[in-house]
Image: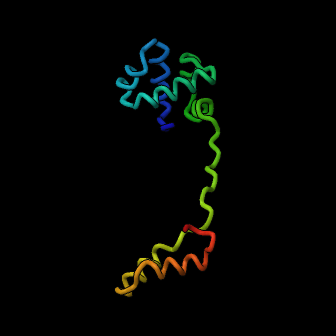
Amino acid sequence: MERLSSHKIKAVLRLAGLGLSQRQIALSCQIGQATVCDYVSGADQAGLKWPDVADWDEDRLLAALLPTQRPAAAWRKAAEPDFASMRRELQTHKHLALQLPWEEYRQQQPEGYG
């Protein structure tokens, strides 16, 4: 979900409260229709209506609309190769193929990328 300023979020909620379509709101606020949908549905799920949030500050508004974001799970199973050192080696030794640095990486990281 794209993060907007509280001013834009409030504008989206105000226009939705007036009964405008998501397309009209997106055009009026110059944001994507998917973003409008995210904020309107988030407000509905949180039970927020426009007059209630009119005087809220940005922190309070975002805390009510956005769920707490958990850090992304580590999906890499092993450390990446040191691409910078591989590049230096390849530039230094003009007849060196990628095969040798790759084999050295696989010796150091047998469970690494293969």
Percent of width and height locating residue 114: 55, 68
Left or right of 13 on screen, residue 109: right
Q: In which quadrant of the rendered view does residue 104 lie?
A: bottom right
Q: Measuring 64% from the left and 39% from the top, which residue is drawn there?
A: 68
Left or right of 94 on screen, residue 2: right
Q: Nearer the viewer, residue 95 or 33?
A: 95
Q: Nearer the viewer, residue 107 or 74?
A: 107
Q: Measuring 55% from the left and 16% from the top, which residue is drawn there?
A: 51
Q: Is residue 52 above or below residue 106?
A: above
Percent of width and height locating residue 48: 60, 20
Q: In which quadrant of the rendered view does residue 109 lie?
A: bottom right
Q: Measuring 39% from the left and 31% from the top, which residue is drawn there?
A: 31
Q: Is residue 92 above or below residue 33?
A: below
Q: How many marks?
A: 0
Q: Nearer the viewer, residue 98 or 80?
A: 98
Q: Is residue 3 above or below residue 40?
A: below
Q: Measuring 56% from the left and 31% from the top, which residue is drawn there?
A: 57
Q: Is residue 88 above or below residue 65?
A: below
Percent of width and height locating residue 15: 44, 18
How does the figure colour the protein chain or chains?
rainbow
Residue extending furthest toward the top? 19
Q: Nearer the viewer, residue 9 or 109?
A: 109
Left or right of 13 on screen, residue 74: right
Percent of width and height locating residue 69: 62, 42
